[in-house]
Image (cartoon, rainbow, N blue to C red):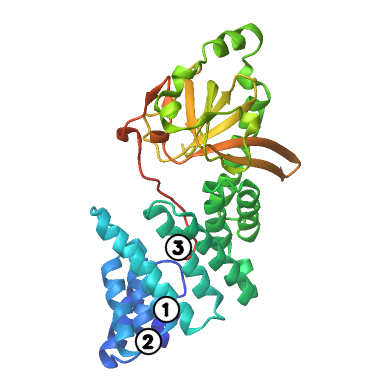
């Protein structure tokens, strides 16, 4: 077992380690650490099924936090064509991670794994804000109970990924930057930070210039705005038409806004689809749409109606650059009217998250 453990310290799969550790568990099936080490070897081999069998084998002999953590990670690696089965795997992953935390609440690694499990659950089950907060809380707890957790680049990257989706751009940029500093050879956080900075820089410029549409052309576009474009969000829905400047941070219940598209912007990761909306008062806000199919979009000059808009105010400072702007978050294109027409269910797609961890 000790020899197999020594051979298993590298990031790459070792056939010799597999052979030696397999022999160890045959000689002593109760050797929990050998089961855990063998499971890691299979994981490096991309044999997720065998890895899961090993971690379950260890737990059959002794409940321990290492096996529970590893099992949690393996459950998230199990891909299935069945959406319900994938959801069950993610939920089981959360369950195993919570058990690992309960065995030792002072273990930062267990809290970090729980945060990752909640992160996967957030994207798998409809992006419930409560689940995203549970993920963030777990990451905070990992750093609180274990000082070394603050030096884990994976933690900072994964948390930044969630912050970006939640439009907490300051936290996202800080997280990507921190991950890059902790692991200079890791290209992923550097790329993500540059992509987000580039997106914010372009967005801020477009908002400041209203997409370079001004004067008579803008007036002509706005002149075609009329109450008929509110569609079923008009009198029958009981929503009152308000200007963009009227909106308050958070969800504006009972309100509807209407404006013209003056630009569109699609980031490298294609989420969110972003466009500039100018209303009758010529205020220009960003609109960020999530969970749309790749083929969905709006064109310059389109009229867009947004019911009960969710307003966010941004003030971001990073590496000498400052971005201050307002945006409206739209969780699905189905919520919108474009040129007075409802957007059908076919415009909606599920969100996914992709991250490239160093150790998971």
| Closest to the observer, 7 or 294 | 294
| Marks 2,1: beta carbons within 8 A | yes
Whether residue 7 is visible, yes or no, is: no
Q: Position of residue 210 (x, y in %)?
A: 63, 21
Q: Earlier in the sequence, mark 2 or mark 1?
A: 2
| Marks 3,2: beta carbons within 8 A | no
C-alpha span from label 1 to label 3: 14 Å
- The residue located at (38%, 33%) in the rendering is 294
Q: Position of residue 327 (x, y in %)?
A: 59, 36
Q: What residue would you read off at disc 1? A: 99
Q: Is residue 253 left or right of residue 206?
A: left
Q: What residue would you read off at disc 3? A: 118
C-alpha span from label 3 to label 2: 22 Å
Disc assigned to residue 63: 2
Determine which quarter of the picture holds residue 242: top right
- Dot 3 surroundings within 10 Å: few (below 14), some, or many (20 or more)? many
- The residue located at (45%, 39%) in the rendering is 290
Quadrant assignment for the C terminus: bottom left
């Amino acid at each position: 077992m000790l020899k197999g453990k020594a051979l298993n310290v590298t990031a790459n799969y070792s056939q010799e380690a597999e052979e030696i550790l397999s022999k160890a568990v045959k000689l002593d099936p109760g050797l929990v650490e050998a089961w855990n080490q063998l499971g890691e070897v299979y994981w490096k081999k991309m044999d997720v099924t065998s890895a899961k069998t090993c971690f379950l084998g260890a737990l059959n002999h002794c409940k321990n936090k290492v096996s529970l953590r590893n099992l949690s990670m393996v459950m998230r690696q199990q891909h299935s064509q069945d959406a319900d089965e994938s959801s069950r795997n993610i939920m089981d992953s959360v369950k195993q991670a919570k058990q690992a935390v309960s065995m030792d609440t002072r273990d930062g690694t267990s809290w970090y794994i729980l945060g990752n499990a909640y992160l996967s659950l957030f994207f798998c089950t409809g992006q419930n804000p409560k689940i995203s907060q549970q993920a963030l809380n777990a990451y905070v707890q990992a750093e609180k109970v274990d000082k070394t957790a603050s030096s884990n680049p994976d933690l900072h990257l994964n948390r930044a990924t969630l912050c970006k989706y939640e439009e907490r751009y300051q936290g996202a940029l800080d997280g990507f930057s921190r991950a890059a500093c902790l692991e200079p050879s890791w290209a992923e956080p550097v790329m993500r930070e540059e992509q987000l900075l580039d997106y914010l820089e372009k967005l801020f410029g477009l908002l400041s210039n209203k997409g370079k549409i001004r004067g008579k052309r803008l007036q002509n576009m706005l002149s075609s705005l009329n109450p008929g474009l509110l569609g079923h969000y008009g009198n029958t829905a009981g929503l009152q038409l308000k200007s963009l400047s009227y909106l308050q941070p958070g969800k504006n219940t009972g309100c509807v806004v209407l404006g013209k598209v003056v630009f569109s912007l699609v980031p490298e990761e294609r989420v969110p689809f972003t466009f500039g909306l100018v209303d009758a008062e010529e205020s220009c806000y960003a609109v960020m749409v999530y969970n749309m199919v790749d083929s969905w979009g709006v064109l310059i000059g389109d009229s867009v109606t947004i019911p009960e808009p969710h307003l966010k105010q941004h003030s971001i400072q990073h590496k000498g650059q400052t971005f201050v702007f307002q945006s409206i978050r739209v969780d699905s294109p189905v919520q919108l009217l474009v040129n007075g027409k409802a957007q059908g269910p076919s415009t909606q797609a599920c969100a996914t998250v992709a991250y490239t961890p160093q150790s998971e």
